[in-house]
Amino acid sequence: MYGPPVDLSCKAMQCVADALLELPRSGLRPLNTTADNKYLSRSLRLSYNNVTDLDGLQDTLSHFLAQPLKLAWLDLSFNKLIHITPVRLRSFLQELRVLYLHGNQIGQLSEVDKLVQLQHLHTITLHGNAIENCKGYRCWSEDRSAKLKVKVGMV
């Protein structure tokens, strides 16, 4: 059975790969591990850091999670992401359902359109990004909300 999120938030990381040098925060519910010290979780929290891109995400998932291809929830909120790097997202985020991107610096609608390749993704948070100021953002988010639950306000 899967446990609570692997929490790597508030670690002052500059890049996703910096997580490899960190230990997850302990929460109210203990993280269960396998014999090879991988966490039995489908959730990863990388919020409140200084991450600027997604390079190293696949290695980080493989390092921490017993079943990295089963990741369902990823919290990248309150970082410094500008771009959503198409790092073969579909190949290793195939089960992703929820993606928190609020409080970043994403400024182009085309960046979020890259996520269309994630077939199970149903919820994205985008408030607090420069994208909110793009002409046509509200129409764009309403159009996408037929497939996705795009949160444009506060969660």
Image (cartoon, rainbow, N blue to C red):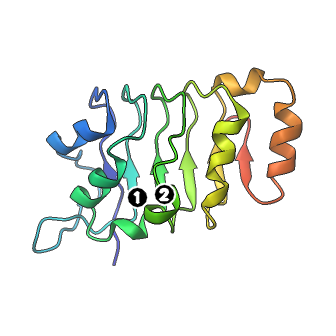
Name the N-terminal-most of marks 1 and 2. Answer: 1
Residue at (10, 74) in percent of width and height: 35
Amino acid bearing label 2: Trp
* Residue 12 figure quarter: top left
Above or below, comparing residue 102 to residue 32 in the picture? above
Query: What residue would you read off at disc 1?
Result: 43
Q: Residues within 10 Å of mark 2 (few under 14, many from 20)?
A: many
For label 1, the SS is strand
Q: How many labels, in total?
A: 2
Residue appearing at x 37%, y 25% in the figure: 50
Provide residue 5's location: percent of width, then percent of height.
36, 56
At 46% from the left and 49% from the top, the residue drawn is: 87
Q: Position of residue 6 (x, y in %)?
A: 31, 53
Question: Is label 1 in contact with label 2 (beta carbons under 8 Å)?
Answer: yes
- Secondary structure category for the residue under label 2: strand
Residue that extends furthest to the bottom in the rendered view of this protein: 1
Quadrant in which the C terminus appears: top right
Left or right placement of residue 96 versus residue 54 in this view: right
Question: What residue is drawn where x is 39% and y is 65%?
Answer: 42
Three-letter amino acid code at the position of disc 1: Ser
**Does 127 appear above or below 134?**
below
- How busy is the neighbourhood of tag 1: few (under 14 within 10 Å), some, or many (20 plus)? many
Q: Where in the figure is residue 36, as x and y percent of width and height?
A: 11, 70
The residue that mark 2 highlights is 73
Closest to the observer: 127 or 147?
147
- Quarter where residue 154 is shown: top right
Question: Does the image show residue 155?
Answer: no
Mark 1–mark 2 distance (CA, rounded to whole Å): 5 Å
Of residue 123 and residue 92, the one placed in the foreground of this image is 92
